[in-house]
């Protein structure tokens, strides 16, 4: 069941004015949330335990307690909490180090208008991780329970392994008009518009290898009637029958 509680954003920021500006920018985008600001390790740990943030937005550099320390503590407590670094400046080498350390994203304060996008993307990624975990747990249960879970998902779900479609839910069949048997009979590229196949295959191969790929991107699929439909996809890696596969949400 979807969580209906208000979004909770924890700001790790020593300057109240910067936290206010960040809040204002996010609210301008229409996102509703409650917030809390902390500026020390003790207050941060307490907020993790009591405030239970859905997203953390942290300054990179602060006296006595910095963003990388906060990131490490957050990952130790719950690696699924999205963590966005908000900084006055950051070179490419530092940015890469932050992302490798586990940050969801980073935003330069001069480009504060990008913060709402980063927050929404972080929330989306968290939902995908939760959905992936739910799917992996369901795989260890009966096929009937798994079918109930994915068939009631709001999105089309497709599992691809070794270039073949191993599983589709009801929404995937309704989206395209193909049956399970028709999906299983051809390589997954056969259902994609010819002009979009190269980019989809390239992203699929990169994801399987663990290389960076776009969080979400769009391409065209061909329905059973021969019509063209645009879809937006996000994907994650999971184990399917003991082998790596991609879990795709359309």
Image (cartoon, rainbow, N blue to C red):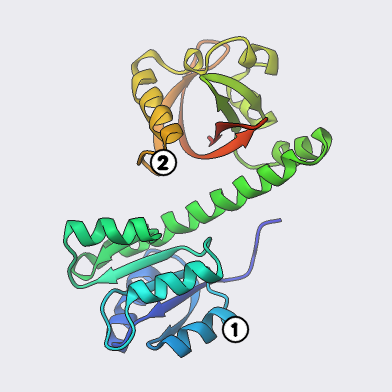
Q: Earlier in the sequence, mark 2 or mark 1?
A: 1
Relative image position of residue 52 (x, y in whole percent): 57, 76
- SS state under label 2: loop
Depth check: give the residue in front, 250 or 174: 250
Instruction: Write down the residue under mark 2.
Output: 216
Quadrant position of residue 100: bottom left
List x then y, in percent, for residue 128: 55, 48
As helix, strand or loop, the secondary structure at mark 1 comes to helix
Residue 131 placed where, x, y %?
A: 62, 48
Residue 172: where, in percent of width, then height?
62, 28
Give how far apart the Cα atoms at labels 2 and 1 are: 33 Å
The answer to whether 222 appears left or right of 144 in the picture is left
Q: Is residue 231 above or below residue 109?
A: above
Q: Residue at x 42, y 33 (%)?
A: 209
- Residue 21 vertical position relative to residue 155 in the rendered view, above or below: below
State the image quarter where residue 199 is shown: top left
Q: Which residue is mark 1?
A: 50
Q: Is residue 174 visible?
A: no
Q: Using the image, tell me which numbered label, if any, was put on residue 195.
A: none
Binning the other alpha carbons within 10 Å of mark 2 as few (below 14), some (14 to 19) or many (20 upward) gives: some
Q: Residue 68's image quarter?
A: bottom left
């Amino acid at each position: 069941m979807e969580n209906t509680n208000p979004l909770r954003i924890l700001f790790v920021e020593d300057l109240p004015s910067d936290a206010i500006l960040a809040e204002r920018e996010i609210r301008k985008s229409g996102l509703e949330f409650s917030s809390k600001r902390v500026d020390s390790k003790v207050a941060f740990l307490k907020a993790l335990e009591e405030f239970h943030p859905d997203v953390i937005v942290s300054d990179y550099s602060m006296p006595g307690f910095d963003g990388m320390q906060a990131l490490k503590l957050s990952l130790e407590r719950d690696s699924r909490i999205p963590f966005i670094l908000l900084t006055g400046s950051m070179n490419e080498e530092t940015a890469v180090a932050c992302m490798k350390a586990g940050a969801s994203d980073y935003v330069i304060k001069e480009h504060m208008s990008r913060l709402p996008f980063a927050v929404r993307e972080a929330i989306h990624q968290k939902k995908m991780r939760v959905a992936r975990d739910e799917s992996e747990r369901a795989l260890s249960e009966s096929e009937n329970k798994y079918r109930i879970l994915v068939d009631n998902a709001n999105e089309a779900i497709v599992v691809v392994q070794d270039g073949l479609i191993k599983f589709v839910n009801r929404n995937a069949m309704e989206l395209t008009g193909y049956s399970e048997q028709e999906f299983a009979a051809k390589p997954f590229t056969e259902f994609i518009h010819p002009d979009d196949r190269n980019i989809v295959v390239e992203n699929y191969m990169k994801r399987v290898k663990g290389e960076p790929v776009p969080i979400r991107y769009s391409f065209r699929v061909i329905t059973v009637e021969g019509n063209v439909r645009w879809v937006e996809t996000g994907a994650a890696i999971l184990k399917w029958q003991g082998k790596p596969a991609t879990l795709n949400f359309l």
